[in-house]
Amino acid sequence: PRAGENEPATEKSFESCSSPTTRCKEAFGGVCGGNGEFIQDTSFRLKNSRRDRIAYFLDRILAKRSRFFILLGVWGLLQVLCAGACYWLVWSGKLEDSDPRDDDQVWPIVETIWQAWTFMADPGTHAGVTMSGERIVASMITLSGILFFASILGVTVDLIREKMESLRQGKSKIIEANHTLILGWTEKTIHIIEELCKANESEGGGVVAILAPESKGQMELELELQLPIRYRRGTRVIFRSGSPLVMGDLLRVSVHLARAVIILSSTGSADQADADTLRTMLSLRSLYDQLQSHVIAEVR
């Protein structure tokens, strides 16, 4: 057979090697021929490196918080076992003078695993090690323990910050019944709250919940400026940030347990405001078997 007869067919394209685009293509499998033409091998395919695949695998695992905690627990367990095995290789077998156990009652591998855990959990524990080899391994175990518990601390801080941010934005659920629910935040909302406070004064106060797209902090600030707590006559006002058009947000304010629902017309054109009011009514209509409240809607 002639040379190259059994070689796989390769589609090739030719360009000038002088162009910047061609020089860039050389990094992806092309070569320059002797006549100054660029030969692009189209059989070449970009491949993901092992590092990219590992990073993608970890990204999928860490995307869910539950998987991350499982991975963190497995990492800690393997770290303790590996550290205990490494410390067992250099352990002299000498127990502390205060240890009441005999030598035949001590399992070396179990003892070294326990020592590795104490080194990780308490960085100052390795200060009592005297042998040079033990000191080196104990110091490395202590450093790995610091990194492990720093990861746990970082996740814990992240969870607390996320929860505090959720509470600040008004994302938690309201557990109330027989409360008055106002959907929307307009210039009329504070006046309605004031009238409700006067009406609830004879009963020792009540609960008014407000669901609006505005931020919780903004609504609380406006209410505090125009209607301080001392003028609310024992009525508690609870804010939640969300859309009255979303069923999930309506359930977060326990709309099915409210004794009255007031739908305020949104700002903007009259047609759009009435359309939003109608959509909110239809959302409430889907809860007809659970809704126990009177519904009052503003129409423009």
Image: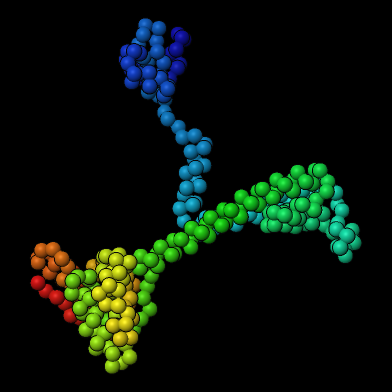
Residue furthest to the top: 35
Is residue 102 shown left or right of residue 11?
Answer: right
Most foreground residue, 45 or 190: 190
Up/down of 159 relative to 233, above or below: above
Q: Quadrant of residue 113?
A: bottom right
Q: For this view, does 42 lie left or right of residue 112?
A: left
* Residue 3 visible in the snapshot: yes
Question: Eyeballing the image, is 41 above or below 175?
Answer: above
Q: Judge from the rendering whether residue 152 lies leftward or rightward of residue 84; answer left or right.
A: left
Q: Nearer the viewer, residue 208 or 202?
A: 202
Residue in the foreground of this view, choosing between 270 and 112: 270
Query: In x, y percent, where is residue 43?
Result: 40, 24
Quick check: 150 above or below 55? Answer: below
Can residue 293 be seen here? The reply is no
Residue visible at 60% across and 57% down in the picture: 73
Residue at position x 65%, y 52% in the image: 145
Instruction: Tell me where residue 267 appears, x and y as whole percent.
Output: 15, 66
| Image coordinates for residue 6, horizontal then vertical, percent | 45, 16
Q: Quadrant of the C terminus?
A: bottom left
Image coords of residue 275 (percent x, y) = 14, 67
Q: Residue at 11% across / 74% down in the picture? A: 299
Task: Give the residue at x 61% y 50%.
Answer: 147
Tell which of 233 and 211 is nearer to you. Answer: 233
Q: How did the renderer colour the structure?
A: rainbow
- Number of numbered discs on residues: 0
